[in-house]
Amino acid sequence: MRKSLLLGAMLTSSAMGAMASQTVQLVNIYGQCLDVGEREGNIGGSPFLARCEAGKASQRFRTDGDVLRVADRCLDVRGWAGKEGADVIVASCSSGTSSQRWQRGTADGYVHNQFAGLCLELGRQAGPARLARCSGGASQSWSWQPVK
């Protein structure tokens, strides 16, 4: 059984949630949503925090297996850089791209990149989304709110 070191404790892979296919908004503890931007040309841009709006397409993530998709765009890691501090970006979806694979932490809502073994981090203040060691901190805690 695969084990991952997260939050200073050993968790079995059963503690990491496989993402059932659904549409969600990723909401941080301050009530802000992860947003990929409305422009089609945001490819290569960084997701950012915005006021949550249920009908806003750029905040509606479709969980397709282990991919987080907004329309035809996916969350990815710039340059496949599997290291702490690497930028999380909006990219064209490409099947088989390991840097576009994410897992949901069932206990604390973190978003774990399978390629890098690190978590999506985006602080309350403006700044780029990036990969960081999974710490369970506020900047890594996400609520997965289903939307219709």
Image (cartoon, rainbow, N blue to C red):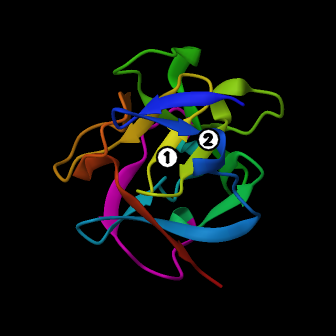
Q: Is residue 8 above or below residue 17?
A: above
- x 50%, y 35%: residue: 89
Q: Does the magenta stretch mainly form a helix, a strand or a loop?
A: loop
Residue reaching furthest right?
95
Q: Are marks 2 and 1 in contact (CB under 8 Å)?
A: yes
Q: Which residue is mark 1?
A: 111
* Residue 90 locus on image (x, y percent): 55, 40
Q: Is residue 6 left or right of residue 136?
A: right
Q: Of label 2 and label 1, which has the lower sequence position?
A: 2
* Residue 108 locus on image (x, y percent): 40, 56
- x 64%, y 27%: residue: 99
Give neighbour class at mark 2: few <14, some 14-19, many 20+ (Cα, 10 Å). many
Q: Is residue 130 above or below residue 86?
A: below
Q: Amino acid at mark 2?
A: Trp
- x 59%, y 80%: residue: 147
Q: Is residue 52 magenta?
A: yes
* Residue 83 locus on image (x, y percent): 44, 15
Q: Is residue 109 left or right of residue 115?
A: left
- x 41%, y 27%: residue: 87
Of residues 51 and 123, which is closer to you in this image? Answer: 123
Q: Is residue 23 left or right of residue 105?
A: right
The magenta region covers: 43-57
Q: Which residue is mark 2?
A: 102
